[in-house]
Image: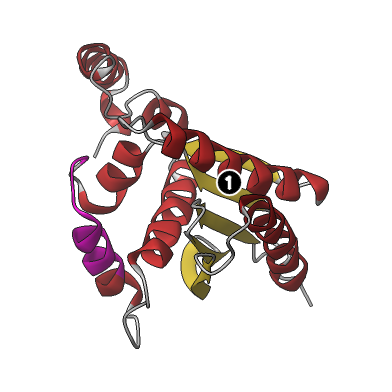
Amino acid sequence: MEESSHTERIILGIDPGTQILGYSILKIVDQHPQVLAMDVLYLKKIKDFNLRIRKIFDTTQRIIDTFHPDHLAIEAPFFGKNVQSMLKLGRAQGVAIAAAMSRDLSISEYEPATIKQTVTGNGNAAKEQVAMMLGSMFKFPTEPHYLDATDALAVAYTCYVERSHPLADIRSQLRPTKKRQKSSRKAWADFVVQHPDGVA
């Protein structure tokens, strides 16, 4: 009897936040993703900011110990006008990454525009559009309590797409940032010319 050739991996997706942190668990078996868990960590009632950070660290470790993911996919902090909010968000992201590193997970970080582009095809899509698209793909039995949970699933799904696609290295160079739009179009055009049989 031949041994099973099934491949399986689990991605933990996190949308960091110091008031509400979203997380998801995406299991991939033979390139077929399925949602194992999706929820939020509600932190608003914790007044001490340092205790919020500790809660994020402890909860991330608990999630890892429960589902045993292989990889952490996390959304990068966006650059807004409120510097203090950016700093706090960066701390939330940092402690989640530290918790993942303490459990020896590999880590990927994705910009918000990249995540939206991957899920909806529009790098400027609203959170509601992202949630609707994911709900259609994964057939949610009920809507998540908060959009932060679907944002966490979106980052996990982005990681799955990028790590599974046969052109993953080129896709990583084509992220929808203003600085890369022109060079990205040229890179893709060059690839098509050089590999006409590799493009469907």
Q: To which quarter of the image does residue 165 belong?
A: top left
Task: Provide residue 116's location: percent of width, then percent of height.
Answer: 28, 47
Q: Residue at x 56, y 39 (%)?
A: 108
Q: Mark 1 = which residue? A: 92
Q: Amino acid at mark 1?
A: Ala
Residue sitting at the far front: 47
Residue 55 in the magenta stretch? The answer is no
Q: Residue at x 20, y 46 (%)?
A: 121
Q: In the displayed structure, would residue 88 be above or below residue 176? A: below
Task: Provide residue 105's location: percent of width, then percent of height.
Answer: 73, 47
Task: Provide residue 40's location: percent of width, then percent of height.
Answer: 49, 69
Q: Which residues are magenta?
A: 123-134
Q: Residue at x 18, y 49 (%)?
A: 125
Q: To which quarter of the image does residue 187 belong?
A: top left
Q: To which quarter of the image does residue 147 belong?
A: bottom left
On screen, residue 101 versus residue 170, left or right, reads: right
Dot 1 alpha-carbon crowd within 10 angstroms: few under 14, some 14 to 19, many 20 or more: many
Q: In the displayed structure, would residue 136 be above or below residue 186? A: below
